[in-house]
Image: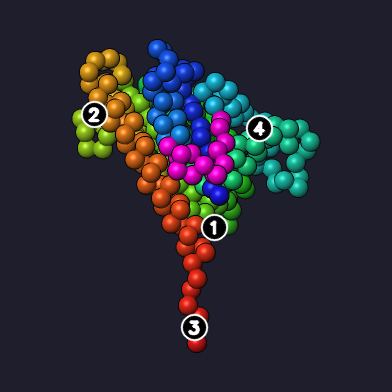
Amino acid sequence: MATLLHIDASARPGRSDRDRYGAHTRRLSAKFVERWAQIRPDDRIVYRDVGQEPPTPVSGRWIRAAFTPPEAREPWMAEVLRESDALVDELLAADVIVAGVPMYNFGPPAQFKAYIDNIVRVGRTFGFDRTRGDVPYWPLLAGLDKRLVILSARGDFGYDPAQRIAHMNHVEPSIRTAFGYIGITRVDSVAAEYDEFADARLQDSLRRADATAEALADRLAAEAAAGEASLFRVRPKIA
């Protein structure tokens, strides 16, 4: 049984396929998760809505607590890190992270940046040792075979690699960088565009994104099943 962590980051509370002012990213993330659940109904799905319940932004007290060795922390430090610990625990338990993250002013929403700041944790998701010289950091989640799926929506169009305004897209690149830093490097992404135009191009983009998100769920669920089957495959004995 796999665990899927479903995160929504949009400030809009509904889904655009059900609510007039709903979020396209909530629609896409739900499409992916619903398709996954149809294929793998026994898997565990954990939901976190950082758009409606944003994590507490990092503060000076948080930084002091996080960089204090656990055995030397004062009681207040454990309290300051309690929310971050819960978010990290969820991430560590997940095999697939599905994140609905819209583009706000060319980057992810502040709510999702607060989430990233809480899960990129020294001693928990990345290591730090000054004696290593110029590269004192290393990812602690590398080799755990976790997969990240980013489902986004953009007001303009042409943000994909090699397109007209790709250089202005700081959503997928920044998320890939942060998750790669802690060792999650297997990343897939789907995005809808033309939201600000609100014309037939938006509807076409949403239909394509819906289909692509569901096809991606099919493929990753099949890969998960194949990986599980390999664990139980009987290997021939070596004489």
Label 3 residue SS: loop
Q: Is residue 45 magenta?
A: yes
- The stretch of residues the image draws in magenta is 35-48
Q: Amino acid at mark 3?
A: Ile
Disc 2 target residue: 158
Residue 168 lies, in percent from the top left, at: 30, 29
**Quick check: marks 1 and 4 in contact, CB under 8 Å?**
no
**Apparent side of residue 13 relative to residue 213 in the rendered image (left or right):** right
How far is disc 3 from disc 1 in space, using C-alphas?
41 Å
User: Depth-wise, is mark 1 or mark 2 nearer the camera?
Assistant: 2
**Quick check: marks 3 and 2 in contact, CB under 8 Å?**
no
Please say whether residue 176 is visible from this viewpoint: no
Check disc 3: other Cα within 10 Å, few if <14, some if 14-19, many if 20+.
few
Disc 1 target residue: 132
Q: At x 24% / y 15%, what residue is drawn?
A: 199
Residue 48 lies, in percent from the top left, at: 56, 30
- The answer to whether residue 16 is above or below residue 79 is above
Q: Earlier in the sequence, mark 3 or mark 2?
A: 2
How far is disc 4 from disc 2 in space, using C-alphas?
37 Å
Q: Amino acid at mark 1?
A: Arg
